[in-house]
Image (cartoon, grey):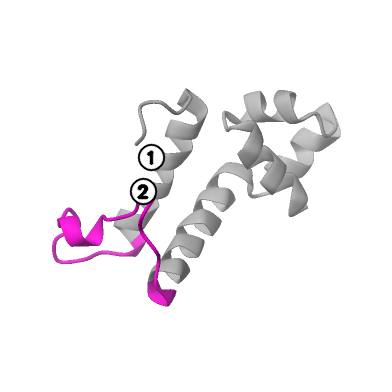
Amino acid sequence: VNAQDDVRTRRWTVLHEIIHFLLHRRDDPFAEALNRAGPLHFYDHHEMREEQEANEFTEALVFGDGALEAAVSLHGRNLETLSRHFGVSVATMKIALGKL
């Protein structure tokens, strides 16, 4: 988790990484070679699929079961209000609204 990120981004990242741990078990989940994401890392096809799965699972936990639609009906599409409501970054909220 990047300590320079705001608390909402860090929360999302922690949840995303917990999902990786649960869905994508390895013999040694803390092996350095398996945790090489960063500015110079290029994901292969398998890793991209795992990233997408972790993102989709995280989105389902945070926004699923009609929660996003209900919040939009209460608050409209105000990004800042919705991002505070869900405890996520504005960028994450924008992506979620784009998927409605």
> Relative to the observer, which residue lies in front, 30 or 62?
30
Tag 2 residue: 17
CA distance separating discs 1 and 2? 5 Å
Above or below, 97 against 99 in this view is above
Above or below, 98 against 80 in this view is below
Tag 1 residue: 14
Image x and y of residue 38, in percent: 35, 50
The kind of residue tagged 1 is Val
Image x and y of residue 43, in percent: 40, 66
- Are the residues flagged by discs 1 and 2 in contact, CB closer than 8 Å? yes
Q: What residue appears at the point 78 percent right and 52 percent down from the top-left corner?
A: 100
Residue 98 marker: none
Label 2: few (<14), some or many (≥20) within 10 Å? Answer: some
Q: What residue appears at the point 71 percent right and 29 percent down from the top-left corner?
A: 82
Q: Is mark 2 on a helix, strand or loop?
A: helix
> Relative to the observer, which residue lies in front, 12 or 73?
12
Q: Which residue lies furthest to the bottom in this view?
A: 45
